[in-house]
Image (tube, grey):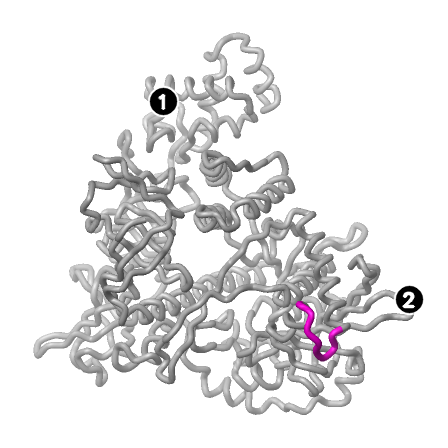
């Protein structure tokens, strides 16, 4: 029965609900391990009216009473494993371990709707992030899916950062990572000079079946805990980023000639006589993008997006290329940048410094005054930047001050504004993100923290980079005629999970806001209207936070599905090859295809995309960890002081509070809230007092006192003073 026919039949109500039981049950039997609530079933069958949804709800109750399905959590059902019509033969699944500090774990798998619970005595020496095989236990009614890890397919990591604890009889490394539930035993002969209290790196060498702890050896001594360099290096190692380039890579970099051969310049389009500028943060050391602009005789504008041509210097298979690929990206910690490329390349040879000839890969567009594009060109070029601007200088010009190349900057600003308006008109979602900045003293200790505001000068650069990324992707991914698209590296962003989106819609609906899901464009428009409506209100932070959590994460792939958040059917990363390996892959492929090359291996590039996505996530986590450390360090001498903040998260352990002005986040533990016994209302993002009914919801403005700081765990503890 088709969705359309089922929907019409339900509306006519001929034959009663019994005739639809098999149709509803078929949804469960086709996905025996997946959980569904009545809304999800209705969506599967194309049901939209309220009366028909009630009919589905009643059918679910009947099926549960008949023990055809079981309730796995409130309002959510799954096929009973003992159902006679079920085709369940899978008792083993593979997945990734999400290890808890207590030693219990959950295995996240694409094969089931819910995570699989693993008791601490059934983890089989698996650690966080490991890829494993799980044997599923028979599911009991009303209980979560449980299992036992029977095989470790692939270790996520074998080296850990921690502090040495040594006595006259034994030594251990106590890991910093709270998801590592065991210490690592270090034989004395494997300490390699490490002393009690040192922060060091241990490599796991063995884990005998009969042992509760793994055996390891110290491979590197970082130094004393609390030292700024030691702590920042600890974060890098924890997220699998090397502290140094190899000697071979450094030597390879030093041998690169900084003088551009005239023969190479003659092969390229020459923009050295065209006004070209860079716009970057004031403290930037590498400049990987530049903009050129000139007015043509036709009255149209030629705008060039010029990107450092890293691919000309970094050859596939070279040592530098291999190490850049392993890193995947530059890492931006609070007080330093860990570059993807050796410094000679990132800060010198490839950096688009003013008044120096530089090799670029360019995307050049012909535009009218409304930013309509009438022509485009992609290829290798040579430029000479006229002036280096920082964002504040350009912002002052936009706001009315005089400055160098004011007319050209205002034209770029005008065109960027038109591009931005068109982007939002076509369905881009205007997510905002605040960046925390610290003022550090000479020892790296934070003496102040503030939120950096994104202004029109930032948007000017962003809009032209988005344009280049989009049209480069279309150039290869959207060939003319019947030609098949060649393998390419896309930046993709999937549509939001329907269940998460439904939950979010219901939540904001309770607060008087509406989202319209009849089309992707309508949903994007209502998201943007929502963000505008909540601006400056108490619930702004809460709703924006949940909205971001509702969305899928962007990643790299050779399989293009478009970029949902930007509203682009084609999108790639082309504009930052100094700091992102996927951009370097994009340059290489684009150059090859512009010169008539056959399609590259999809399998090879898909593997590289997966690796790049993993390293990007690790870099984000490392950057967050450095921010959390500096936030904890910033508050370490403020114990007992009171601050205003907003509840940024809720859990069964307590509420998270983010301080106004600096975004330092800490927890108010539930056990410390003595005025009542509080429980978590997960669906409504709040905790509720059982006796007096007092509620603390995501977004509630509160006053807290700094109770305790644990720098080693990057943890901030608050006491709740009041609203």
Image point (20%, 75%), residue name: 164
Q: Point out the residue furthest to the right here.
A: 297
Which secondary structure, mark 1?
loop
Mark linked to residue 298: 2
Q: In which quarter of the view is residue 33 placed?
A: top left
Report which residue position mark 1 lands on.
Answer: 68
Extent of the magenta region: 399-406
The mark nearer the N terminus, 1 or 2, is 1
Q: Which of 427 and 538 is in front in this view?
A: 538
Magenta highlight on residue 400:
yes
Which secondary structure, mark 2?
loop
Is the residue marked by circle 2 packed among few (<14), some (14-19), or many (20+) residues within 10 Å?
Answer: few
Q: Position of residue 461 (x, y in %)?
A: 65, 67
Q: In which quarter of the view is residue 403 placed?
A: bottom right
Image point (38%, 81%), residue name: 441
Drawn side of residue 65 relative to residue 522, left or right: left
Q: Which of 161 and 147 is in front in this view?
A: 161
What secondary structure is the stretch in magenta mostly built from? loop
440 to 80, vertically: above or below: below
Q: Nearer the viewer, residue 271 or 154?
A: 271
452 to 486, vertically: above or below: below
Task: Mark 1 vs mark 2: give the one in front.
Answer: 2
Q: Where is residue 325 in the image (x, y as percent from the top left)?
A: 52, 71
């Amino acid at each position: 029965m088709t969705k359309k026919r089922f929907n019409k039949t339900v509306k006519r109500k001929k034959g009663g609900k019994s005739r639809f039981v098999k149709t509803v049950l078929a949804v469960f039997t086709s996905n025996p391990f997946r959980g569904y609530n009545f809304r999800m079933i209705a969506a599967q069958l194309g049901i939209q009216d309220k009366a028909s949804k009630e009919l589905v709800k009643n059918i679910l109750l009947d099926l549960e009473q008949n023990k055809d399905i079981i309730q796995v959590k409130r309002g959510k059902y799954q096929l009973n494993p003992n159902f006679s019509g079920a085709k369940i033969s899978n008792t083993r699944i593979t997945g990734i371990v999400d290890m808890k500090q207590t030693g219990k774990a959950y295995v996240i798998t694409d094969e089931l709707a819910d995570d699989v619970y693993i008791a601490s005595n059934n983890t089989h020496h698996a650690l966080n992030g490991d890829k494993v095989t799980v044997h599923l236990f028979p599911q009991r009614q009303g209980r979560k899916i449980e299992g036992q890890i029977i095989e470790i397919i692939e270790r996520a990591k074998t080296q850990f950062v921690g502090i040495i604890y040594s006595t006259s009889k034994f030594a251990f490394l106590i890991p910093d990572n709270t998801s590592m539930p065991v210490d690592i035993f270090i034989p004395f002969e494997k300490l390699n000079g490490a002393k009690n209290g040192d922060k060091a790196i241990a490599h796991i060498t063995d884990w005998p079946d009969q042992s509760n702890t793994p055996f390891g050896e110290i491979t590197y001594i970082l130094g004393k805990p609390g030292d700024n360099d030691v702590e920042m290096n600890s974060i890098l190692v924890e997220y699998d980023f090397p502290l140094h380039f190899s000697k071979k890579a450094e030597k390879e970099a030093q041998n690169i000639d900084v003088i551009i051969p005239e023969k190479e310049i003659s092969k390229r389009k020459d923009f050295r006589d065209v006004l070209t500028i860079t716009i970057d943060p004031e403290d930037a050391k590498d400049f990987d993008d530049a903009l050129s602009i000139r007015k043509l005789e036709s009255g149209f504008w030629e705008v060039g997006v010029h990107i450092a041509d890293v691919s000309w210097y970094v050859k596939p298979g070279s040592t530098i290329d291999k190490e850049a690929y392993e890193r995947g990206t530059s890492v931006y910690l609070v007080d330093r940048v860990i570059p993807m490329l050796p410094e000679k390349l990132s800060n010198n040879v490839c950096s688009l410094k003013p008044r120096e000839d530089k090799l670029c890969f360019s995307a050049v567009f012909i535009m009218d005054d409304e930013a309509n594009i009438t022509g485009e060109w992609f290829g290798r070029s040579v430029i000479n930047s006229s002036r280096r601007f920082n964002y504040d200088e350009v912002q002052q010009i936009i706001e009315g001050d005089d400055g160098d190349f004011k007319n050209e900057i205002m034209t770029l600003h005008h065109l960027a504004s038109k591009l931005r308006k068109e982007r939002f008109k076509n369905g881009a979602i205007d997510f905002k993100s605040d960046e925390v900045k610290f003022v550090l003293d000479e020892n790296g200790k934070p003496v102040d923290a503030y939120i950096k505001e994104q202004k029109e000068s930032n948007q000017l650069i962003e809009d032209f980079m988005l344009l280049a990324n989009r049209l480069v992707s279309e150039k290869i991914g959207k060939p003319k005629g019947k030609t098949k698209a060649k393998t390419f590296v896309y930046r993709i962003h999937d549509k939001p999970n329907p269940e998460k989106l439904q939950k979010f819609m219901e939540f904001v609906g309770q607060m008087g806001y509406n989202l319209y899901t009849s089309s992707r464009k309508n949903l994007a428009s209502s998201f943007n209207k929502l963000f505008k409506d909540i601006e400056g209100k108490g619930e702004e932070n809460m709703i924006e936070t949940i909205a971001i959590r509702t969305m899928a994460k962007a990643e790299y792939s050779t399989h293009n599905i478009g970029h949902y958040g930007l509203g682009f059917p084609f999108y790639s990363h082309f504009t930052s090859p100094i700091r992102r390996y996927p951009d370097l892959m994009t340059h290489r492929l684009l150059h090859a295809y512009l010169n008539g090359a056959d399609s590259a291996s999809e399998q090879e590039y898909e593997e590289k995309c997966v690796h790049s996505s993993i390293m990007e996530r690790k870099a984000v986590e490392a950057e967050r960890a450095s921010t959390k450390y500096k936030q904890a360090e910033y508050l370490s001498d403020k114990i007992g002081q009171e601050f205003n903040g907003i509840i940024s998260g809720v859990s069964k352990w307590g509420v998270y509070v983010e301080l106004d002005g600096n975004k330092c986040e800490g927890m108010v533990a539930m056990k410390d809230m003595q005025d009542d016994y509080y429980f978590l209302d997960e669906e409504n993002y709040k905790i509720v007092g059982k006796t007096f009914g007092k509620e603390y919801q995501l977004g509630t403005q509160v006053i807290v006192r700094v109770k305790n700081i644990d720098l080693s765990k990057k943890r901030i503890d608050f006491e709740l003073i009041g609203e």
